Amino acid sequence: MCLIVFSYKSHPAYDLIVAANRDESYARPTRAAQFWSGQPQILAGKDLKAGGTWMGVTKEGAFSAITNFRDPTIQKENPPSRGHLVLDYLKNPVDSNAYLQQVDEKGDQYSGFNLLAGTVDQLAYYSNQQKKIRQLEPGLYGLSNHLLNTPWPKVVTAKQSLEKIIQGETIPEEALFELLADERQASEGNLPNTGIPKNLEKIVSPVFIKSDRYGTRCSTILLIDKEGKVVFEERRFKAGTQNIDEVSRFEFEIEHNT
């Protein structure tokens, strides 16, 4: 993912509300979100090039998602795929703190990343650029290609939109997708300085990115209510547009191991 905004235990009816956009090269092969054969407890899309995923949830209610950390000065020789950090957690969702400690031990092998992992009872954040495990308190959060809650224009805009949405008793799903569809570019003076040319900074500054070869490939929402009902919907787009190419939607109740 390249933008994730989420409400954690900040709504009377929902423990987790997530709205996320995955930005990627249009040419990178990808499979739509589904329950995985061989790993039927995992619901996620799949990166068909490296085999990992960018966001997923399990039937038991474990959740994980990742964003890249944008810094062109970080150069690694043949780094492992960051998408496997999400997948490995979903395969074996142990205590999030214990898992992120394992990630920390090998984090320097990877290009820059931000990782969310946990459940509605214990959600944690880790970045290999900060090297600190943070157990998240109830609140509203935004994550793009810098550290958690870094006030990039797209993060600020998306968080403000989500804050308005969660004021209501119910969460209109279409409002979450509208949040993710914002194509407004940041003004020149508000662009972050991440080491890429300014014209590229402007192109990738919106919540929803469109360019010739790279942009928002899919938008995903995840809702987990206090009764354990999960709603997961992924909308995939035709390259360079907001024309919906495919929709994957799932609803289920969290399974509790006895």
Image: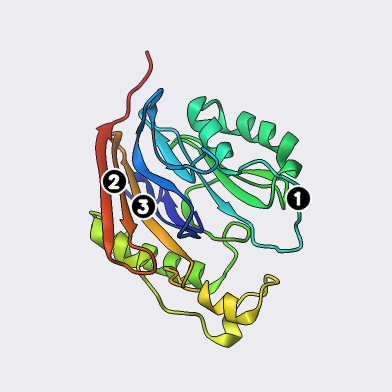
Dividing the picture into quadrants, the one containing residue 21 is bottom left
Marks 2 & 1, CB-CB < 8 Å contact:
no
Residue at position x 31%, y 67% in the image: 242
Residue type, numbered disc 1: Lys
Q: Using the image as rendered, state which of residue 247 and residue 179 is in the foreground.
A: 247
State the quadrant of the C terminus: top left
The residue under label 2 is: 13
Quadrant of the image occupied by residue 182: bottom left
The residue that mark 1 highlights is: 76
Q: Secondary structure at mark 2?
A: loop
**In the depicted structure, whether residue 239 falls above or below residue 80:** below
Q: CA distance from mark 1 to mark 3?
A: 30 Å
The residue singled out by tag 3 in the image is 220
Residue 167 appears in the picture as rendered: no
Q: Kindly report which numbered mark, 3 or 2, lies closer to the viewer in this rendering.
A: 3
Q: Which mark is residue 110?
A: none
Q: Nearer the viewer, residue 3 or 203?
A: 203
Dot 1: what SS? Answer: loop
Nearest-to-viewer mark from 2 and 1: 1
